[in-house]
Image (tube, coloured by chain):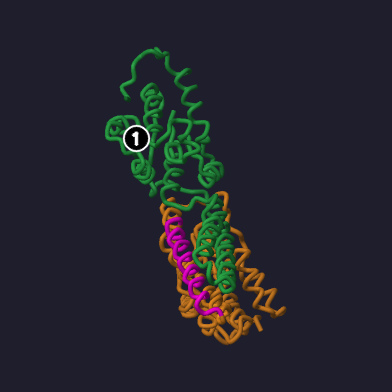
Chain colours: A green, B orange
Amino acid sequence: MKFVLDTSIFVNPEIRGRFGKSPSEAMREFLRYAEKLFGKVEFYMPPGIYREVMHFVDDESLRPHIELYIVKKPPNVHEIKIPAFVVYELIDDIRRRTDKGLRVAESAVRESVIETDNVDKIIQKLRRNYRKALREGIVDSKEDFELILLAMELDATIVSADVGILTWAQKMGIKWVDASTFRDVLEGLVEKLTGSDPSKRSQVE
Amino acid sequence: MKFVLDTSIFVNPEIRGRFGKSPSEAMREFLRYAEKLFGKVEFYMPPGIYREVMHFVDDESLRPHIELYIVKKPPNVHEIKIPAFVVYELIDDIRRRTDKGLRVAESAVRESVIETDNVDKIIQKLRRNYRKALREGIVDSKEDFELILLAMELDATIVSADVGILTWAQKMGIKWVDASTFRDVLEGLVEKLTGSDPSKRSQVE
């Protein structure tokens, strides 16, 4: 059994809360499960996602366990192939978003002519709306795309809370678990797959 | 031998000039070549491109010849697969373009606060620069992508003058001819492939 892990599990505050108060605490808690499932369940991260997560997890004592229980692997982008209709829909989606981005920009310009004193506020709003138009709910980074490709390659389950990633996973026939339910899944797997003594001490401190 | 034809051959004024003064004249001239090459060379258009071209070619007398000499065929988007690295690069390219689009929008807002009388001019400039940032040199429409997919499927040669299309064709190992040289190619093919009597009368009037 294989899982490919997204940053949201450890970084997104709403999701992370299920595991711990900080990214480091969430990672520590996750590693306790990974330790128990060692040899039975494999956890992967592509390099871009790993870098992002490690940017937030700043506890040196966790490093050896992370290296042991999370396999770092890039997808083989020169071997994997994507169904054309997925790319077709992506191009169409981006085109519509691009058009919307221009409308957002135009209305910001028109607004700023009237409210010349509020330029900073208008720019903030522009950034918010532009981001919403162009980036929300779409796979918009190499890091996200690597996650999908790695899951394809390994026939693994994606664990993410990102709408864009989950949408693509579903289009491409990839198994997925919503990150918000991941702790329950791990709990269940430990129960089903291991006969481990709950009093046995973890090495992840 | 198979060619997949882009709109630029008949619509783009610089390219079209090699065939005729108007889209209809260019089409008529192209069809004279297609007639001579009938049975030896096949010419294809995906549906989106065909619709675009027919929007400009408004000569009813050409219709039967177009139907005979240009095969309309959509690509089979559910069978064809795209190498992952091409999509990977596309996603990265779009991300950089999206960021640039926001910078273009922000500078338009800052400009409009200073020059409140020139809002129309600023919006025109915004549109120009935004288009340049987001759309130039990229496959940004379903129509363009269909062209690439159809050429892949048929192992045909793409004929286009669009930088985005030609760039993708090259990444994906697709044969291509720059539309600006297409007339010379046709001329050469007629010479090489047919022993046709040059005095023989064409049915394309």
Q: Find out whether residue B52 is within the magenta segment.
A: no
Residue B40 in sight in this render? no
x, y (%) of residue B91? 45, 55
Front residue of this view, candidates B56 and B100? B100
Left or right: residue B77 versus residue A157 is right
Residue shown at 43%/43% (left/top)? A147
Residue lying at the far right of the rendered structure: B60
Left or right: residue B29 versus residue B161 is right
Residue at the spot of label 1: A71
Front residue of this view, candidates A24 and A158? A24
Q: Tell me which segment is drawn in magenta.
A: B91-116
Residue B120 in sight in this render? yes
Residue lying at the far front of the rendered structure: A117
x, y (%) of residue B200? 60, 84
Q: Find out whether residue B101 is within the magenta segment.
A: yes
Main SS of residues in magenta: helix
A56 up-or-down from A62: above or below: below
Residue shown at 30%/35% (left/top)? A59
